[in-house]
Structures are given as C-alpha cells and as structure tokens.
Amino acid sequence: MPETPKKKKKKKKHNPLLDYLFYVMVRLIAILLQIADIDASLRVARWLGRGLYRIYGRGRERALENLRLSYPEKPPAWIERTACRSFEHLVMFAFDILYTARLMRHSTWHRYTKINNIPEVLQLLLNGRGVILVTGHYGNFEVMGCVFAALGMETFNVARPIDNPYINRYVYHVLHQGQNIIYKKGATDAMLDVLKTGAALGIVADQNGSRKDIFVDFFGRKAATYKSIGLLAMQFDVPIVVGCCRRLDDRFRFEMVCNRIIYPQEWQKQDRPLHWITAEYTTAIETFIRQDPEQYWWVHRRWKTRPPEERTK
C-alpha cells in the first residue's frame, strides 16, 4: 500500500512576552558569568549538563539509542558515560558563547586555540578561488569562524536562527562579530553568490536531510545527507575542506584540525561523483567524531529520515 502522507506540524507560535523574559534571564546569567572565572563557569556548565541529562528523558534516550547503534561493541557503562558527557559538552558550548567574542580577538586567539595541520587550508582560503568548509555538531564549531575572522579571513557561514528573536539578535551581536552569517531559510541564492565571488562558505553538515537528499553510511547506518554541498562543489569546481574544533581538557581551549580535503580532480574520476562526494565528507566527519565521541551532539535526530527500502510499505 502507498505510504500515507504525514501532516505537516504547525509551527509553534512564540509568546513575545515569554521570549523577552527568557532573554532578560539569559542576559543576567551572562553578566554573572562575565564576572566569574571561566574555568569555574565551565564547571558549573558541566554540572548543569549532568542535570539536563537526568531530567530531559526524551533527549537522554535518543542519545543513548544513537550511541548503542553507533557503537554496538561498547559496554552499557561506556554508552551511559559518553551520553552524559555529550550533554556536558552541549551546555559548555552554550556557556562558551558568552566568552568567545571577547577572548577570540586578533591579538589573543592563539592563547585559546591551536591550529594543527591546516597550512594547506589557509592557502585555499587565501587564494580567492572559493572553498567549502564542512564540519559537524562537535566540539565548538563556532570558535572556527571566530578564529578565521581574527585572522582577517572572510568566511560566510550558513546557520539556523534561534527561535527566540531577542536571543538571536543578542547571540548574533556577541558571537558573530567579524563573521558573515547566512540564514538557512532562502540561503541558496546567497550561497551561490559567495562561491561566485571566490569566498569561503562554511556549513555544519551533519543534520538529518530529507528524502530527496542522498543516503550514505554514517556510523554503520544509512543517513539522509545534504546533497547541496556536492552540487555546489561540482558547479563551482571548488574543494571541500572537512575539519573540526575540539575542546581540550574541559577548558576554554581548543584544537582546530583538518582531516580531509576533497579536491575536484578526485570526484572527476568517479562514476557517481555526487554520491561519492557526499559519502566522502560524511566519512571524514565520522572520523573526527570517533577521536572523541563525548564531544558530539548525540541528542540530534541524525538518522530520523530513512531510505526507501526501510520505510513501511
């Protein structure tokens, strides 16, 4: 029997007053955090992350299930510990936002971030021919944009706006100084313009795609994965750089790493270049996640969309 079409969920309406009150609360917390020592703040963040793990049952179970299926060889204690640590890193990421713009400046960024094995990436950013920067929801991907901005390199990063408009404006002002943000809704034309001018386009590319995207292996399971990245790379003949920014020692210290550069001459040899590119950058994302899985956002519904052969008939 044909699959019954699902009804679209109505977009949740926001209460402007509640949004503003929540914004005020966030600003008050931000003031307190700015006064506090950053290491102490991150200890509080880890404590809050453990609390969130305990009370957010649906998210906890999703993270545990994703880890069990991704690491079937690991014992339950490892799965539990990694899931809880993932929540700690998620809250630390939120706290980082309040410090990043202040600390990641031209004269200070090197105190908090080291750049490993990416001279080739810097050359690609400087040659003005265009490049696509790909990462995942891992470590602190926002720090990467701040470092590039501090180095005077212009990048355009695709992002989803925060639902609360007051917090969205605040975060944009605090975090994205010196960066160019393209909001996902209606981003196609803007992304084309970026690559036409030979600039760098940054995309967090590990979210669940649609049925129209490409299904490739991610931790041993098929995952709907954006095909737009491969299409853009092929259209403009630009390389794809895959890397991450991982946290070091639970502190506001990071390591930026590039673990794969996919060049046009590589996919030009492939029979199915679009599928090959998509699988290749997804494998590269999985590679850096496996180096420290605690820093990945396992709460995401990464495998929500299933391939045709797995859907209910």
Image (cartoon, rainbow, N blue to C red):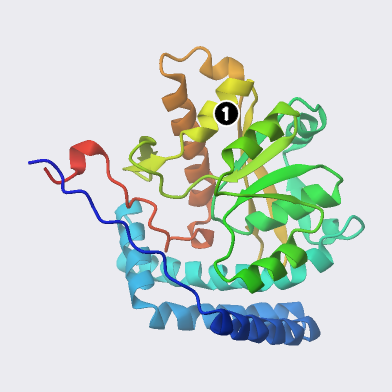
Is residue 93 depicted above or below 142 in this figure? below
Question: Does residue 2 appear anywhere in the picture?
Answer: yes
Quadrant in which residue 118 is drawn: top right
Quadrant where the image shows the N terminus? top left
Left or right, 84 with reference to 3: right
Q: In this orientation, which residue lies closer to the viewer: 215 or 87?
A: 215
Q: In this orientation, which residue lies closer to the viewer: 9 or 173?
A: 9
Q: Determine which residue is flagged by label 1.
A: 232
Q: Residue at x 41, y 18 (%)?
A: 272
Left or right, 46 with reference to 310: right
Quadrant in which residue 36 is drawn: bottom right
Mark 1 element type: helix
Quadrant where the image shows the C terminus? top left
Is residue 234 depicted above or below 206 in this figure? above
**Tally of numbered tags:** 1
Classed neighbour count for the residue bearing mark 1: other residues with Cα under 10 Å, few (<14), some (14–19), many (≥20): some
Question: Does residue 251 appear anywhere in the picture?
Answer: no
| Horizontal and vertical percent position of residue 45 | 60, 79
| Horizontal and vertical percent position of residue 105 | 86, 59
Q: Residue at x 41, y 49 (%)?
A: 208
| Horizontal and vertical percent position of residue 259 | 61, 38
- In the image, farthest residue toward the right: 107
Q: In this orientation, which residue lies closer to the viewer: 287 or 179?
A: 179
Is residue 70 depicted above or below 297 in this figure? above
Is residue 17 depicted above or below 197 in this figure? below
- Give the amino acid at mark 1: Leu
Q: Residue at x 46, y 20 (%)?
A: 273
